[in-house]
Structure formats: structure tokens, C-alpha cells
Image (spheres, grey):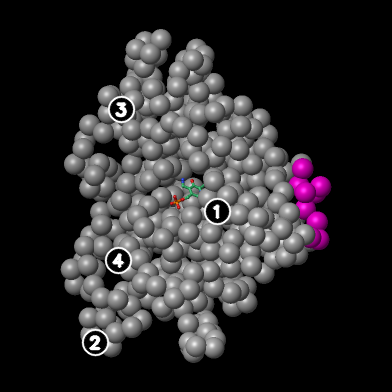
């Protein structure tokens, strides 16, 4: 593999056009890489047609581009087969797909285990499933640092547990989940594992086979690709047994007034016109990611994260949320400052060209467990540098003066 050094802001059209902007909200949406944007434009201007329907050359070109995008996603995830890749509109759609398709195979009394650290998109679909089917929903608690408290795992998982659905990495604290421990516990009782990779995928190519999970969900906009597209990977033998979620064009084998039969995966799970150009753009982003030196990028991001944490620790009345500073974490740092609302902090920072998110980050159960209603979050990506971190620390000093 040809490994490249950390990419510069210039490779990201929005950042290149706004040199003054300090973008520290990549956990919400990462900036799109030039190769992904170019691929979308190229597709829309040379190959735009619907897929799996037309026989004219333009439609065939669209089919080929869409099939290649699937192959790229399969390579990025080290999937066993291209047919295990389902394109969706994003991680939320992927997670809802599992909650319906897999969820429909569950019955009252079956158990699903999630954690209190989940994003609402891996929380609410399971509550809805509980309402629909009478499953029992259990929750892995979190430690005071927001990490999954796996000490509780043995008493939460048993032969009735059919699925464990957890995040790979918290969008609030950056804490990585010990996936191997979850998979080992799930395997012991024959439960399946769904990993919400929305925050993991920004940190490099994944290996779903090595992770040992059964489903993996992510969004394109979090890994330098376009919005409106995501992936659900599922084990082939498992997908083959699942009923569809959404129904309509493109997902059937035959339809008569009496009955409909389903196409094989992945088509069974891609009803309607899929996000074609977006999938092509996502594939370009994934291809580009596969050329990078991730060890070097992680080392650089960790240094920036440490610099930020050191600076934040010097601010009186600031409480850092999340794992101990020495713990391995994704470069996501959340904090609260006593007496100041995160929205006010973010507004003052915005006036200094600093883009950060404040609020509950779609993780209210986690924030409640950490004892806060809202917090401010800085998330660092591969295009950030030391000057962004120092500007944030200066901006916070200013915000403290302005708001107190
Ligand atoms: N899970 C996690 C951990 C996330 O951070 C997010 C996005 N913030 C999602 C799921 C949902 O992703 P999307 O909004 O792209 O569907």
C-alpha cells in the first residue's frame, strides 16, 4: 500500500476556500475530500442514470460505477463478499434497517442488549422494537468516564440475548469500545453483534472479519465522503435469512397480486432508487483513505488531543468528560464549564471562526449518566493542526471573559 503523510487542508475544498475557519466538528460531519467531490461531479455529468433497470449504454455505465462503489466499500471493510454491502442513506438508516429486518425475527421475551453510551440512532430504534414486539431491552452501564462498564456484562447477557448493539466509539467522549470483549461474551450465548461504526470509520479502514461482528453501520459524511449515503455490512449467511425492511422497486424477485418474493441481498435491502452518485463519491473517499498512513495520522491526532486536554485542564471550573486523559481515545473531547451554557460558548467561539458543537449530541442517556445536560465538544480530524487547538484554547479564554 502506498502510504501518504497526513493530508493538508488544501485537499478539502471547503477548508481551502476558508483559510480562517477552524473546523473542530468532524465528529458531526467531516469535510468532504476533493476526490469524493470530483467523483460525484464526474458521475452526475457523465454517467447519471438509474441503476439495475436500463439497458442503454449510459445506464450500463451507471450500473458499473455503482457496482464498483460496492466493491470499494467491501475492500474498505474487508467484507467476505461484495453482496454483503448494502448502501443506505446513512448510519441511522443502516441501524433502523437492522432493527426492523433482524428485529422482525425476534419475539416477545427475546433480549437485545445496548449501552447507555449509544447515539440516539442506536437507542430509539430498539425502544421502538420493544414496543412493537415485546422484546426485553437491557443496557450496559457506563463508568464515570463514559466507557462501557463491561464488569456488568455477565449479568446482562444470557441465552435469551439475541443481539448486542453497541457503538464502536462514543461520539461524546471518544471512548473506544472493547469490541473483542463484547463479541466474546455474545458468542458464548449465541447472540449476534451489531457495531455502530459511525465514529470509528473516520479513523481508517476497518476489518469486519477481524472485529468478529455480524453487522457494521456507518455514514459517508463522517469519513470524508458525501452526505446522504451510508453502508450496512452484514454477514452473508445472516442477510440471506432476513426479511426486507423497506419494500418497493428493485428489491423483489417477483410480484403478483397474491404474493411477492424477495431478491437476494444486497438488492433485497435496497428498495427504490439508491444514492448512486453519493455511493460513487463515498467510494472515492474510501479509496483515498486506503492510501493513507493511519499510524502516522493517529499519532498526530493523539498529540493534538493531548495538547487540547492539557490546555483545557488549566481552565478553572472546566470539567472534562470522558475517559482518563491517558486512555486510548478517538480525538473527541467534551467538557462543561460551570455556569456557562454550551450554546453560548459555541456562539462566542463561532465569532472567532471556531466551529464546535454544543448540546446533548444525540446521546441524552450518556449525558444523564455523566451528570450533565449539555456539553461542548471539540472533535479533531486529520486536517486539523496545532494552530486549531491553540486558537480554541485562546477562544475559550475569551469566551470565559465575555460570558462571565
Ligand atoms: N452513531 C453515532 C455514534 C454517531 O455519532 C452518529 C452521528 N452523529 C450516528 C450514529 C448517526 O449518523 P447519521 O446521522 O449520519 O445517520
| 377 over 262 or under it: above or below | above
Q: Earlier in the sequence, mark 2 or mark 4?
A: 2
The residue under the point 30% across, 27% down is: 350
Characterize the local packing of mark 2: few (<14), some (14-19) or many (20 or more) Cα atoms within 10 angstroms: few
Q: Quadrant location of residue 47?
A: bottom left
Kindly indicate whether the residue at mark 2 contacts the one at mark 1 (C-beta within 8 angstroms).
Answer: no
**Secondary element type, mark 2:** loop
Q: To which residue does mark 3 refer?
A: 350
Q: Secondary structure at mark 4?
A: helix
Compute the Cα span from label 4 to label 3.
Answer: 32 Å
Above or below for 1 versus 320: below
Residue beneath label 1, please?
Answer: 196
What span is colored magenta in the figure? 152-160
* Residue contact at pointers 4 and 3, CB within 8 angstroms: no
Task: Look at the numbered disc 1 and say if its residue's Cβ is closer than 8 Å to ligand 1.
Answer: yes
Residue located beneath label 2 in the image: 56
Residue 277 numbered tag? 4
Q: Which is nearer the eye, 317 or 105? A: 105
Report the side of 342 relative to 147 (left or right).
left
Tell me if label 2 and label 3 are in contact, CB under 8 Å: no
The N terminus: image quadrant = bottom left
The image position of residue 312, as x and y in percent, is: 47, 21
x then y, percent, for residue 235: 59, 70
Q: CA distance from mark 1 to mark 2?
A: 38 Å
Lower position in the chain sequence, tag 1 or tag 4 = 1
Q: CA distance from mark 2 to mark 4?
A: 18 Å
Name the element at disc 3.
helix
Which label's residue is closer to the chain start, 1 or 2?
Answer: 2
- Tell which circle, 3 or 1, labels the residue nearer the N-terminal end: 1
Where 373 sits versus 212, above or below?
Answer: above
Q: Is residue 313 visible?
A: no
Residue 95 point in image, percent of width and height: 54, 58
Amino acid at each position: 500500500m502506498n502510504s501518504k503523510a497526513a493530508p493538508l487542508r488544501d485537499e478539502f475544498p471547503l477548508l481551502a476556500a476558508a483559510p480562517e475557519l477552524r473546523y473542530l466538528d468532524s465528529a458531526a460531519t467531516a469535510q468532504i475530500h476533493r476526490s469524493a467531490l470530483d467523483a460525484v461531479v464526474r458521475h452526475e455529468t457523465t454517467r447519471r442514470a438509474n441503476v439495475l433497470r436500463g439497458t442503454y449504454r449510459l445506464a450500463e455505465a451507471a450500473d458499473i460505477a455503482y457496482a464498483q462503489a460496492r466493491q470499494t466499500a467491501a475492500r474498505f471493510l474487508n467484507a467476505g463478499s461484495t453482496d454483503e454491502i448494502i448502501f443506505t442513506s446513512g448510519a441511522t438508516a443502516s441501524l433502523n434497517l437492522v432493527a426492523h429486518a433482524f428485529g422482525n425475527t425476534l419475539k416477545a421475551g427475546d433480549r437485545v442488549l445496548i449501552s447507555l453510551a449509544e447515539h440516539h440512532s442506536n437507542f430509539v430504534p430498539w425502544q421502538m422494537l420493544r414496543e412493537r414486539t415485546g422484546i426485553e431491552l437491557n443496557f450496559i452501564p457506563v463508568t464515570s468516564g463514559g466507557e462501557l462498564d463491561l464488569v456488568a456484562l455477565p449479568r446482562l447477557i444470557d441465552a435469551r440475548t439475541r443481539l448486542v448493539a453497541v457503538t464502536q466509539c462514543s461520539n461524546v467522549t471518544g471512548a473506544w469500545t472493547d469490541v473483542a470483549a463484547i463479541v466474546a461474551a455474545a458468542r458464548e450465548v449465541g447472540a449476534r453483534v451489531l457495531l455502530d461504526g459511525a465514529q470509528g470509520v473516520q479513523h481508517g479502514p476497518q476489518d469486519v472479519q477481524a472485529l468478529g461482528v455480524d453487522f457494521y453501520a456507518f455514514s459517508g459524511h463522517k469519513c470524508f465522503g458525501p452526505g446522504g449515503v451510508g453502508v450496512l455490512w452484514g454477514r452473508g449467511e445472516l442477510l440471506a435469512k432476513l426479511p426486507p425492511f423497506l419494500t418497493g422497486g428493485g428489491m423483489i424477485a417477483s410480484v403478483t397480486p397474491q404474493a411477492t418474493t424477495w431478491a437476494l441481498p444486497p438488492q433485497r435491502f435496497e428498495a427504490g432508487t439508491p444514492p448512486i452518485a453519493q455511493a460513487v463519491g463515498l467510494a472515492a473517499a474510501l479509496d483515498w483513505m486506503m492510501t493513507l498512513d493511519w499510524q502516522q495520522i493517529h499519532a498526530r491526532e493523539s498529540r493534538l488531543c493531548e495538547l487540547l486536554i492539557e490546555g483545557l485542564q488549566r481552565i478553572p471550573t472546566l470539567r472534562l468528560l470522558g475517559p482518563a486523559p491517558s486512555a486510548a481515545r478517538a480525538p473527541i473531547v467534551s467538557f462543561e464549564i460551570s455556569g456557562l451554557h454550551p450554546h453560548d460558548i459555541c456562539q462566542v467561539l463561532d465569532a472567532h471562526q471556531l466551529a464546535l458543537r454544543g448540546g446533548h449530541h444525540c446521546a441524552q442517556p450518556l449525558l444523564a449518566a455523566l451528570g450533565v445536560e449539555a456539553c461542548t465538544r471539540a472533535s479533531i480530524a486529520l486536517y486539523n493542526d496545532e494552530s486549531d487547538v491553540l486558537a480554541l484554547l485562546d477562544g475559550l479564554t475569551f469566551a470565559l471573559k465575555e460570558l462571565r
